[in-house]
Image (cartoon, rainbow, N blue to C red):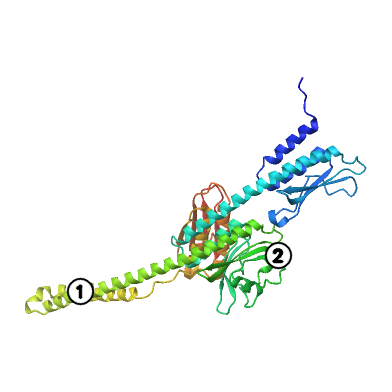
Amino acid sequence: MTTQPAPRLTRLLEAVLEVGTDLDLRSTLQHVVDGAAELTGASWAALTTADPARDGLAEIRTQDRGDLPERGPRLRMPVLVREEEFGELLLAGPPGGAPFTAEDEELLRVLVTQAGIAIGNVRLYEAARQRERWIEGAAAVTNALLTGEGADDALATVAERARLLADASAGVILQPTAEGGMEIVTASTPEDPEGIVGATITPGSPVLEQLLGGEPVFIADSATDPRMTTRVRHRFGPSMMLPLRADGRLIGTLALPRRRGDRPYTAVERLLATQFASQAALALVLADARRGRERLAVYEDRDRIARDLHDLVVQRLFATGMMLESTRRRPDAEDVRDLLGRAVDELRSTVQEVRTAILALQQPPAGPPTGLRGRVLRETACAAARLGFPPSTHFTGAVDTLVPDRVGDRLLTALRRALDDAAGRPGVSRVDVSVEAGARSPDGAEGVRLTVSDDGGGAALSWWAPL
């Protein structure tokens, strides 16, 4: 005759299986708490962690059971992960209820032992996943920087990718100033970008001295930390400030602040972000060197073209013009005099145009666009890191001259939100952005229109503002 297992042993086995089958830490701890309450008949249970900063969790409670009862029996048991204290499991029974028994403690000890093993496995899995994401992100940034990003776009790419990897509220790049401080030159934030770019850290700041020494700075709350002096510090909570060092020099700082009240960064996140910053700094230096070589090649090519035009084309044109001029002066050339005259004039005009082209080739290439067109292209380039592909961008009308800065700032805010919305929806493989200067409203007023559409089923954005 087969003996059936006791009901409590069956429940214990079920609880152990539930604890060991999830790879999410919060869900695993919730299984532990709920299983402990069910096994012992407790009216309330919670698991508090010994180091909330490590895993980003402070306490997990039984669901829908209110707060800890003021009276009633208590049962406490430590939860160990590889002989290290992870936290404590606390159970409470109803007021006036029977105390917990030795069997309750034994069942709970088996459960928390299995919980320690499961938590260790979840930590290993999550650390591996995080490391994989950061490595992929660093590789994507390196690839983007070494395949044609401009200097400003390169910094924006680093800030954007780091913000996404760190689950931060903003990704910010600071660079040294001539006065010895640091200034925010690029900021990636989908929420409130106003006033961030241009904020400075004054010379002599303790944070600045630590960064200049090549050491990262980890801050629990940017709004209250006395070391933080920027005018935007009140917006943020936990933050990392990571030096971008390469070739023994500081080329900038990557700051990754989270919102006020958000969970602090874990030790693993700090380590991975620091490694990302080191690789990003090296990629920035390599990209700058590559751009320098490309600029030198462009200068050399322009010089060669200018020399060829001057030495070959201009001289031949001039010689041909002289020959035609002498032909026109011959006594027997009356019937072709007008034709020759027009040919000489055309040649003179051509020589002048070629000389103008030579002068233009001898000038340095123009820098990146700084008007609204360039700012829109910069936003779409940043969004490519989130979307996985570059948006298609079209301009109509004199965008840079007709649209004032105040209207352009509002347009960029609307564009940024639309791109973030598209990046957050699954199935989006194409995004079209259109900016039309001189667009008319239904009542005939002249303005600028922004249109953002995608193939993911979301509503297209059509934004208009008067000029």
The answer to which of 62 and 382 lies nearer the viewer is: 62
Q: Earlier in the sequence, mark 1 or mark 2?
A: 2
Q: Kindly identify the residue that appears in the image at 61 percent across and 74 percent down.
A: 200
Q: Which residue is mark 2?
A: 221
Query: In this rendering, is residue 117 above or below 161?
Result: above
Can see residue 70?
yes
Q: Position of residue 101 (x, y in %)?
A: 87, 39
Q: What secondary structure is found at the residue carrying circle 2?
A: loop
Q: Residue furthest top?
A: 1
Can see residue 159?
no
Q: Residue furthest front?
A: 83
The amino acid beneath tag 2 is Asp
Is residue 352 toward the left or the right of residue 274 in the image? left
Q: Which residue is mark 1?
A: 317
Q: Residue furthest right?
A: 96
The amino acid beneath tag 1 is Leu
The answer to which of 89 and 355 lies nearer the viewer is: 89
Instruction: Estimate how packed mark 2 is, as few (under 14), some (14 to 19) or many (20 or more) residues with alpha carbons within 10 Å.
Output: many
Q: From the viewer's perspective, is the residue at label 1 or at label 2 nearer?
A: 2
Q: What secondary structure is found at the residue carrying circle 1?
A: helix
